[in-house]
């Protein structure tokens, strides 16, 4: 892993967006793996700015998002589909038909997951995948104790993730208990991974990811074995390194 520490979330956003822009300049038909959550918001803002400036053209790009809550309509304000439209896709020029977000209301979620894996394969695999990390070390909704070989599938959220995500809902009761999520195996196949983390509340998980054993207790620790992972941290998230 290559680890870089920045002074602010804003600086991480600029660095991460620059890596996306470089990827797309080098390969205009890149397949980008995208993530939701608070951490990538500055990255997406900066990608939109680079696009507005004419520095990067996303018209040839295909995207796949990591996960979606099970049972939420795409129009729901907390769906990850809605989040991505608001925070990124409305501001750049990825063709809508090449945007892939798992459907949380698919009639057969298991089949939706199989089809999603197949769509990633058919697109040629993910070139650059951005990831956040949960306070508990999760990547996407792959919670502690997830087998490393997992593929896209239906998952149960842990109590710690429900608590962490309740800030977006009226109460913890409204947070969906299940999601559809790319697996650790699916994520690991990305050619390049960019993990970003900000704030002291991530310091323990970041330490376990980088210095702990490669152990399903910290799903992100698998990235120690990935051939091309870049980690961008602020001082808070890097506190315990
Ligand atoms: P956050 O979520 O960016 O909102 O902290 C990250 C995650 O849970 O993976």
Image (cartoon, rainbow, N blue to C red):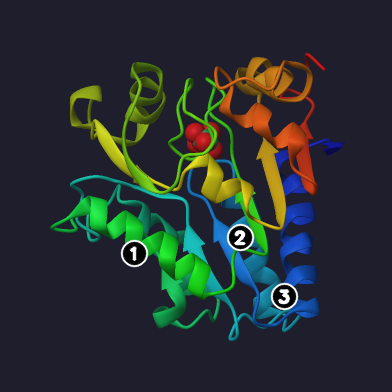
Numbered disc 2: secondary structure? helix
Q: Is residue 241 above or below residue 95?
A: above
Query: If the image is split into quadrants, where does the N terminus sit?
Result: top right
- Horizontal and vertical percent position of residue 95: 47, 83
Q: Dot 2 surroundings within 10 Å: few (below 14), some, or many (20 or more)?
A: some
Give the x, y percent position of residue 63.
52, 68
The residue under label 2 is 45
**Residue 70 in view in this figure:** yes
Are the residues flagged by discs 1 and 3 in contact, CB closer than 8 Å? Answer: no
Separation of residues labelled 2 and 3 (CA atoms)? 17 Å
Can residue 104 be seen here? The reply is no
Q: Quadrant of residue 117?
A: bottom left
Q: Position of residue 11 (x, y in %)?
A: 78, 47
- Residue 127 against residue 189 in the figure, above or below: below
Point out residue 60 in the picture as x, y percentages from the top left corner: 60, 85
Please say if the residues under marks 2 and 3 sit with CB atoms less than 8 Å apart.
no
Depth check, front residue: 143 or 168: 143
Residue 174: name its quadrant: top left
Residue annotated with mark 1: 115
What whole-number distance in Å separates the C-alpha atoms at marks 2 and 1?
30 Å
Q: Which numbered disc, 2 or 3, marks the residue closer to the eye?
A: 3
| Other residues around mark 3 within 10 Å, as few (<14) / some (14–19) / many (≥20) | many
Q: Is residue 207 left or right of residue 158?
A: right
Q: Earlier in the sequence, mark 2 or mark 3?
A: 3
List the residue tagged with mark 3: 24
| Front of the two marks 1 and 3 | 1
Instruction: Answer yes or no: disc 1 within 8 Å of ligand 1.
Output: no
What residue is drawn where x is 78% and y is 62%? 18
From this viewpoint, which residue is outermost toward the front? 149
């Amino acid at each position: 892993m290559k680890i870089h520490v920045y002074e602010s979330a804003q600086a991480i956003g600029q660095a991460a967006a620059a890596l996306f822009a470089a990827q797309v300049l080098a390969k205009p038909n890149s397949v980008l793996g995208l993530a939701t959550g608070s951490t990538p918001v500055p990255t997406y803002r900066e990608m939109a700015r680079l696009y507005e400036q004419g520095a990067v053209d996303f018209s040839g790009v295909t995207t796949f998002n990591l996960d979606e809550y099970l049972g939420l309509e795409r129009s729901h304000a907390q769906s990850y589909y809605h989040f991505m439209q608001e925070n990124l896709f409305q501001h750049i020029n990825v063709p809508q038909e090449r945007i892939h977000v798992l459907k949380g209301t698919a009639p057969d979620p298991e089949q939706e997951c199989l089809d999603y894996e197949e769509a990633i394969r058919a697109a040629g695999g993910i070139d650059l995948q951005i990831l956040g990390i949960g306070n508990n070390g999760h990547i996407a909704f792959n919670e502690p104790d997830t087998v490393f070989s997992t593929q896209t599938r239906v998952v149960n959220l842990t109590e710690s993730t429900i608590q962490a995500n309740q800030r977006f809902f009226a109460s913890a009761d409204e947070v969906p208990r299940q999601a559809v999520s790319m697996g650790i195996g699916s994520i690991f196949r990305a050619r390049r991974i960019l993990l970003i983390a900000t704030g002291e509340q991530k310091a323990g998980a970041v330490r376990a990811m980088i210095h702990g054993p490669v152990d399903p207790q910290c799903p992100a620790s698998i990235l120690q074995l990935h051939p091309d992972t870049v980690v961008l941290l602020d001082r808070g998230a890097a506190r315990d390194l």
